[in-house]
Amino acid sequence: MTATVPVRDSADESYWGTVARLASAQKGTSRTAPAYSRFVNRKLGRLLAAWAYRAGLTPNAVTGISAAFTAAAILLLLVLPPSLPLGLAVAGALVLGYAFDSADGQVARLRGGGTPAGEWLDHIVDAIKTTALPIAVFVCLQRTDLPRAWLAVPLVYAVVASATFFGMILTEQLRKQNGHAGITAASGGIKDLITGLLVLPMDYGVLCISFVLLSAPGLFLALFSLLTVGSFLFLCLALRKWFREISGFMGAGPVITPSVIREQS
């Protein structure tokens, strides 16, 4: 269940007061959320959300800022060869983009709640960057002398990331459609920390930071390959779990199918 943030005029409190108000009503987080996303990015997003709220920005505007930073990083990868300045610039832009991606939902809660249109926009941006970023990596690495066969790794990553993103979104929608809530828990505890560390290979935040190694293409591709393998193994386990979970919904209520979606659109 999403926590409710008491609505209050930003002029009546300090910046840190807004941060504290957000922290006191933090949204529940999936127990399987990776460590960086859960323990670092959420807090960075909270700081940016407090700033954006006090600046009068809407959640959609914050989503736009997130998209702009991510698009800038992707564009740099498409037009420039690997180098240390490029790696640092891309990593910085992606980290900020990811933090603003966390901030838009928090701004929505500060303003009294989000909207379906805002959630739709957020998911569309995420869907685009999920495939656009690894494709940009593929283009960038074409400018190196790395073995051609290894350049397929970013393309494999794009397929795995896309399937994982779609699987998560569809599974969550089917849960809601059939009256099953997602598994959430407040951050904290050794068990949560261990779980978060185990799923680090699929953490988008780790992918963002990995670009600091871009000036050493071989080392960067080796790390990228490890992230790809880890993400693939996670997807295999997740698909099995999701399928078994969805199979248990049979007879529990209406089920979303492609034909139902077309009839409702």
Image: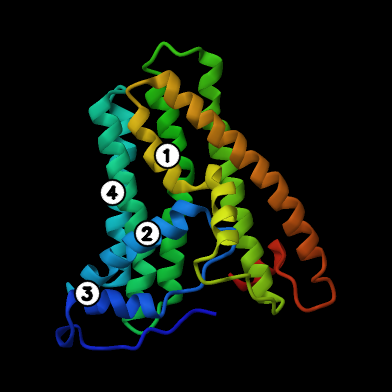
Most distant residue in the right direction: 251
Location of residue 264 (image quadrant): bottom right
Label 2 to label 3: alpha-carbon separation: 20 Å
Determine the residue positioned at 77% across, 79% down.
253
Location of residue 179 (image quadrant): bottom right
The nearer-to-camera label among 2 and 1 is 2
Q: Up-down: is 47 above or below 214?
A: below
Give residue 133's mark: 1
Left or right for 116, reference 241:
left
The nearer-to-camera label among 4 and 3 is 3
User: For this rendering, which residue is in front, 244 or 20?
Assistant: 20
Image coordinates of residue 30 in percent, x first then y, are: 57, 65
Q: Up-down: is 132 above or below 167?
A: above
Callout 1: SS: helix
Callout 1–callout 3 Cβ contact below 8 Å: no
Give neighbour class at mark 3: few <14, some 14-19, many 20+ (Cα, 10 Å).
few
Q: Up-down: is 79 above or below 8?
A: above
Determine the residue positioned at 35% across, 63% down.
43
Q: Which residue is mark 2?
A: 101
The C terminus lies in quadrant = bottom right
Q: Which residue is mark 3?
A: 16
Give residue 69's mark: 4
Label 2 to label 1: alpha-carbon separation: 15 Å
**If you read the primary sequence from the N terminus, does the residue marked by circle 1 or circle 4 appear first?**
4
**If you read the primary sequence from the N terminus, does the residue marked by circle 2 or circle 4 appear first?**
4
Determine the residue positioned at 26% across, 30% down.
86
The nearer-to-camera label among 2 and 3 is 3
**If you read the primary sequence from the N terminus, does the residue marked by circle 1 or circle 3 appear first?**
3
